[in-house]
Amino acid sequence: MVKIKICGIMREQDCDCLNELLPDCAGFIFAPKSRRYITPETALTFRERLDSRIKTVGVFVNEDIDLICDIARSGVIDAVQLHGTENNEYVKRVKELTGLTVVKAFTVKGGSDIDEAMQSEADLLLLDNGQGTGESFDWDYLEDVDRFYYLAGGLTPENVGDAVTRYSPCGVDVSSGVETDGQKDPDKIRRFIQNVRNSDITNIQKG
């Protein structure tokens, strides 16, 4: 089944919405320059409020590894997502020190970006158009991907079903695509999740 990650949780009501709909993952943004940034203390409050079945992912951008380790040790996150220019040595170090699954995000502008992603030491890839741009890249590049990856960038309730049907990513990641006026929209989240799951069932039935 395609995993669903709702990223950029900022409010208690966002947690309550996710508890009702049960996506696979919730994303906490620990990048201070992001408008969706939350403190580790707030993240801990959200983790305690979220259903234990929802895995939490900490999103970092070129962060000091010691800080990532501190947050990982607090138990607030189940996985680390690196969304900057972190190289393979950095990725391996985070894996060794935290013992958590590490996801590495790659901005896809051309085939060379896919080639670079294929060489990553990360456990999973996240293929995106950029750092929270809300726009999609040319999905034709996905034909050359032979690793498990999450698809992100420009996904909405309206187009995610087509993306899942055509490319069968192991997961989809959305933030701005389920927001209205900069805040998470429960109706959009509901439709997004429903469309992913419906398309996933269709793919299974096709065999």
Image (spheres, rainbow, N blue to C red):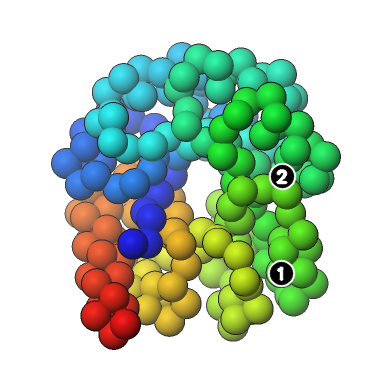
Residue 126 in sight in this render:
yes
Classify 143 as above or below 129: below
**Cα distance in 3D space between marks 1 and 2:** 16 Å
Among all residues in the image, which is located at the extreme left?
A: 20
Q: Dot 1: few (<14), some (14–19), or many (≥20) neighbours within 10 Å?
A: many
Could you say which disc has been placed on residue 114 in the image?
A: 1
Q: In which quadrant of the rendered view does residue 20 lie?
A: top left
Residue 34 in sight in this render:
no
Please give left or right for residue 173 compared with residue 137 in the image.
left
Q: In which quadrant of the rendered view does residue 9 lie?
A: top left
> What's the amino acid at mark 1?
Ile
Quadrant of image for the N terminus: bottom left
Could you say which disc has been placed on residue 84 in the image?
A: 2
> What's the amino acid at mark 2?
Gly
Viewer-nearest residue: 106 or 103: 103
Tag 2 or tag 1, which sits nearer the N-term?
Answer: 2
Residue at left 72%, top 64%?
A: 118
